[in-house]
Structure formats: C-alpha cells, structure tokens
Image (tube, helix red, strand yellow):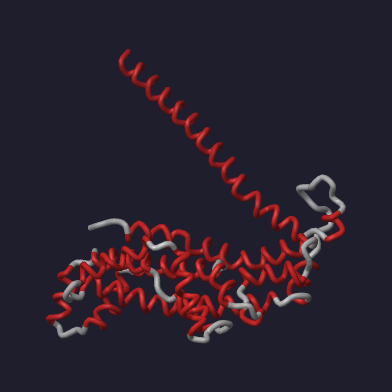
Amino acid sequence: MESQVELSKIEQSAIRRKKIQNFFVYLLLTFWALMVLFPFYWMVLSSLKSYSAYSSEYVPKFYTLAPTIQNYIDVFTTVSLGRYLLNTLIFTLITTGVMLIVTILAAYAFARIEFLGRDFMFMIFLALMMIPNELVIITNFVTITTLGMRNTFTGLILPSITSVFYIYLLRENFAQVPDELYYAAKVDGTSDLKYLFRVMVPICKPTIITITILKVIECWNSYVWPRLITDNSLYFLVSNGIQEIRENGLGRENIPAMMAAVVVISIPLVVLFLLFHKKIMEGVSRGGTKG
C-alpha cells in the first residue's frame, strides 16, 4: 500500500514537472512568435497611417486611431504596381510550369533510366551546386545580352527554368518507388513517359507540390537577375519595381505608401504558405527519407 502511495506521488511530481516544462516552452515559443510577427504588424500598421500622421510621430506609436486605405489606393493609381504584379504573375507561372517539366523529366531520367555514365553525370550535375551563384549570373547575363534578350520575358525566364536542388530532391523521391512497379508496367507494354505521368507523378505528388510552391516563392522574390536584365519599367517585377516606386513614384519620405505596396506584394506569398505549409513539410520529409 505504501509503495502504491509513493508511486502515485512520483507520478504526480513528474506530471507537475512536465507542466512546468511545457509552460516555459510555450512561453518561449510565444515570445519568439511575437518577435517574428512584430515586423509584419508594424508594416501593416504603418500602411494604415496617413503620411501626415506618420511624419508627426516623434515617438512611434504602436496603434492608430484614424486608419486609412488611401495609401493602398495611391500605390495602384499613382504608380504602376498593378503592372508590376501582372509581370510577376506571368513570370512566375511560366517559369514554374517550364521548370516542373524539366525537373520531372530530368529526375526520372537520373532515377529510372539506365544509360552509360548516368551516375557520373549525376555527380557532375550535383557539383554544379558548388559553383557560386554570382558566377552563374555573370555567365547568364553575358549570354542573354549576346542573344539580344534583354528587356524581354524570355530573357527573364530562361535562366530560371532549371534547378539542381529540385532535380536532386525529386530524383531521391523517385528512387524510393519500388522497382517492381516499373518492371510490371514494362511487362504490360507501358512506355516510360506513360509510366512517369501515371504512376511516378501521382505517388510523388507531395514532393512535386513542395517544389512548385518553393519555386513560386523563389520567382516572386527574385530580385538580382530581374534587376540586371531589365532597365525598362515595362518589364519590372514587384521586387525591383518597388525600388522604382520608391525612387520615382511615391518618394523616399512616404514610408506609409511604401509599406502599403510591400503589404500588397507580400499577401499572395503569405496566403500561399498558410494554405500549403503542411504540403511543404510533407514533401521535404518524403524527399529526404529513404525506404
């Protein structure tokens, strides 16, 4: 009887320690979440203040009693934010679509098709990840300029339609699919292309969705390459168009209007991530797990 009482006390003590531990863990996570989310809160808050109200604040206020949407109206009427958004949408959709086709075909070839020097070629292909991105940008810039593709959507899109990392990630995922499925499909007379799109792609759908989302985010946030290859505002994306807005549109001092533009640009990616964040984690975990 005494042993049962002592065991019960030990269990209660362990439960109390666990609760205290969880309390401090959640407290730390809450503090960290507030630290991460505060810049977004400040961005939205500033965008809802008028220029005069923002300028008159000698001490920044963490609230506003007179919110306004005039800044959002200005970024669409005073400057060409709508055109920058459309350009970015076109660039993102085309680049992501072509990249998916290239990635799926390349990953399948490295994972399933037997050809001379496949493993060596894949090793060399992975070695490309070691090359600094700045060197690749210089080469791409010279090539696109020589071909006369500056200030064109073709020049913007071509260097972005492939990714060594995405091919590697999907190749590892394809390699996890049992070989028996491939041999059975071959016995039934199924072509490699049909097997790829009817068997492999549906099985590896989470990873493909992950790659798609990551590529969309990458395209939407692309800055260096569009800035180099375009000097015509007709082809500006939102990432470098925001600089044009600041320099020649709303002015350097109009911080609330700039914040409104940044909010508009950020909303699509925030919504995309909130809708598909579980798919991203699932795809990455599947791509990195063997068996």
| Residue 126, image quadrant | bottom left
In the rendering, at what x and y percent does residue 89 appear? 57, 77
Left or right: where 84 falls relative to 210: right
In this orientation, does residue 207 appear? no
Quarter that holds the N terminus: top left
Q: Residue at x 20, y 75 (%)?
A: 113
Q: Position of residue 64 (x, y in %)?
A: 80, 53
Q: Residue furthest left?
A: 187
Closer to the camera in the image, 14 or 75: 75
- Residue 115 vs residue 49, the one in the foreground: 115
- Across and down, in percent, residue 279 comes to 42, 62
Is residue 14 at all visible to an observer of this figure? yes
Q: How many marks on residues?
A: 0
Query: Is residue 153 placed above or below 207 in the rendered structure?
Result: below
Q: Is residue 222 left or right of residue 44?
A: left
On the image, the x and y values in percent for residue 274 come to 53, 61
Q: Nearer the viewer, residue 53 or 33?
A: 53
Residue shown at 56% from the left, 65% from the top = 269
Q: Which residue lies at the image location 41% right of the left edge and 67% below the top edge? A: 211
On-image quarter of the C terminus: bottom left
Q: Nearer the viewer, residue 282 or 215?
A: 215
Q: Residue at x 39, y 75 (%)?
A: 100
Residue 15 is drawn in which quadrant? top left
